[in-house]
Amino acid sequence: MFDTYDNIVILTGSGISAESGIETFRASDGLWAQHHIDDIATLDGYRKDPDLVYSFYNQRFNQLSAPSIQPNDAHIALAELQRDFSGSVTIVTQNIDNLHERGGANNIIHMHGELVKARCEKTLKLFPYKELSKSLKCPCCKKAGNLRPHIVWFNEMPLFMNDIYKALSNADLFIAIGTSGSVYPAADFVNEANRACAHTIEINLDSTHISENFREHRIGQATEEVRELVDELLSRDRQFF
Ligand code: APR
């Protein structure tokens, strides 16, 4: 690692929430082993069978709301980094859960949307909801059936891409945590960070098929590896600022 950094960009994936009890996508027992992507994570699937899609996201919503699902020490450590670091810390997540926010972090960039919000298809306004259904009336246009999950499905454009690429172009440290690097454009962020000459660190239980693009690898559970890295970054930061 370099001695100090000014602009840290962090990308998180489902691996950071695994120790909180939320399934990852591509593990052998992960979500995509249990469900067909085309049925529940595409606009076509939603048009074909909205009830199936609503039921999938209602289940995810109920799981996330269960008292047993809490932010873990990796979420909390990142919130501490964001609060105490002298420079800027941008957290971009592919996760649709709200565990970063519940762990105390702010301004999370949810590039794949948010489970706790529904979107009006006509006005694009976002609303909290308790249960999605075909009969649920949209608060803005007062029509039933206009609210879809605020989720970026396959073949849809991820959100906030300008902000993310701007942050990456200024980054001097890029950290990817708990993501398999299977989905673009997120899998390409490390290359953008390399172009900006940032130091790059991958934290994962295993190596991934994009590991070779990172300069440093920390293999292990997110709760342990993220905590250790955050403590290192904050103690170096305190020495210099
Ligand atoms: N600590 C660190 N890494 C972990 C942990 C853990 N406790 N548990 C799992 N991992 C790692 C796995 O080794 C794997 O590389 O997390 C990664 C999870 O990968 P995926 O299941 O592919 O999830 P993710 O990379 O977040 O998926 C990206 O795919 O379908 C879409 O939109 C969905 O946002 C998601 C995107």
Image (spheres, rainbow, N blue to C red):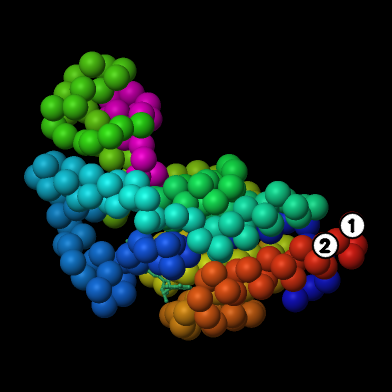
Residue 45 locus on image (x, y percent): 15, 49
Q: Amino acid type of disc 1?
A: Phe
Q: In this view, does 69 lie above or below 50?
A: below
Q: Amino acid type of disc 2?
A: Asp
Residue projecting furthest to the right: 240
Residue 70 locus on image (x, y percent): 44, 55
Residue projecting furthest to the front: 67
Evaluate whether residue 11 shows in this view: no
Q: Which element is circle 1 on?
A: loop
Residue 241 has which mark? 1
Q: In which quarter of the image is ligand 1?
A: bottom left
The picture quadrant where one finds residue 180 is bottom left
Specify whether 30 is left or right of 181. left
Q: Quadrant of the C terminus?
A: bottom right
Q: Residues within 10 Å of mark 1 (few under 14, many from 20)?
A: few
Magenta residue span: 111-127
**What residue is shown with label 2?**
237
Q: Residues within 10 Å of mark 2 (few under 14, many from 20)?
A: some
